[in-house]
């Protein structure tokens, strides 16, 4: 096994992260505001309109992506599910893995898709990088996000 990467502060230099991703029907902002009141931290919210990603004008201000980062290292992500997509309570949690190590993350993507189903191909989204969603052969929902190495935060 190789050694762990070390950051400038002596802590781990995180190349990839695994986070829970919660999906809601029109209540993502309310839920994430509540979770911020529980865990503290910084909440950022992006809306479908910011990326021209809403086919329904009534959904333009819904949450496309929210991220809550706490001082204790918890990162919780969420979004609203557009009305045209299915959402089953109890089945609305995905695992999101992301980072800037494209070779590593593409390999994971390929293995997660093997025997499973691709629900959104690994392609370039409006916000940059690469993003895809799949359900593995055990029924677990995955999101894979590969940051552009030269992009801010990447």
Image: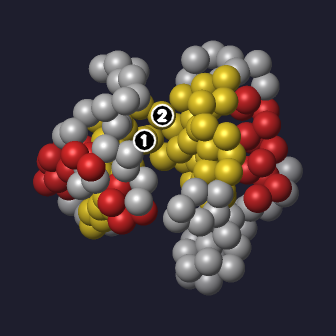
- Near mark 1 (Cα within 10 A), the count class, few <14, some 14-19 or many ≥20, is many
User: Which quadrant holds residue 98?
Assistant: bottom right
Tags 1 and 2 touching, CB below 8 Å: yes
Residue 21's disc is 1
Toward the viewer: 1 or 36? 36
Toward the viewer: 1 or 61? 61
Mark 1 lies on a secondary structure that is strand
- Near mark 2 (Cα within 10 A), the count class, few <14, some 14-19 or many ≥20, is many
Q: Report the side of 32 relative to 142 (left or right).
A: left
Q: In the rendered image of this protein, does residue 50 appear above or below residue 92?
A: below
Toward the viewer: 76 or 24? 24
Q: Position of residue 18 (x, y in %)?
A: 55, 47
Toward the viewer: 46 or 100? 46
Q: Position of residue 101 (x, y in %)?
A: 74, 61
Q: In the rendered image of this protein, does residue 101 appear above or below residue 140?
A: below
Residue at mark 2: 94
User: Which quadrant holds residue 119?
Assistant: top right
Residue drawn at x 59%, y 66% is: 128
Separation (CA) of disc 1 from disc 2: 5 Å
Mark 2 lies on a secondary structure that is strand
Q: Position of residue 149 (x, y in %)?
A: 70, 73
Residue drawn at x 57%, y 41% is: 143
Q: Position of residue 138 (x, y in %)?
A: 63, 16
The residue at the far right in this view is: 1
The residue at the far bottom in this view is: 8
């Amino acid at each position: 096994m190789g050694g762990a990467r070390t950051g400038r502060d002596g802590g781990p230099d995180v190349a990839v992260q695994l986070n829970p991703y919660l999906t809601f029907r029109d209540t993502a902002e309310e839920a994430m505001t509540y979770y911020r009141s529980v865990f503290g931290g910084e909440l950022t919210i992006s809306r479908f309109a910011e990326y021209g990603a809403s086919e329904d004008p009534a959904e333009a201000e819904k949450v496309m992506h929210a991220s809550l980062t706490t001082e204790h290292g918890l990162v919780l992500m969420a979004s609203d599910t557009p009305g045209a997509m299915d959402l089953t309570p109890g089945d609305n949690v995905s695992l999101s893995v992301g980072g800037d190590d494209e070779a590593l993350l593409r390999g994971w993507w390929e293995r997660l898709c093997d025997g499973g189903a691709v629900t959104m191909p690994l392609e370039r989204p409006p916000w940059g990088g690469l993003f895809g969603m799949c359900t593995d052969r055990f029924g677990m929902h995955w999101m894979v996000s590969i940051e552009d190495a030269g992009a801010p935060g990447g």
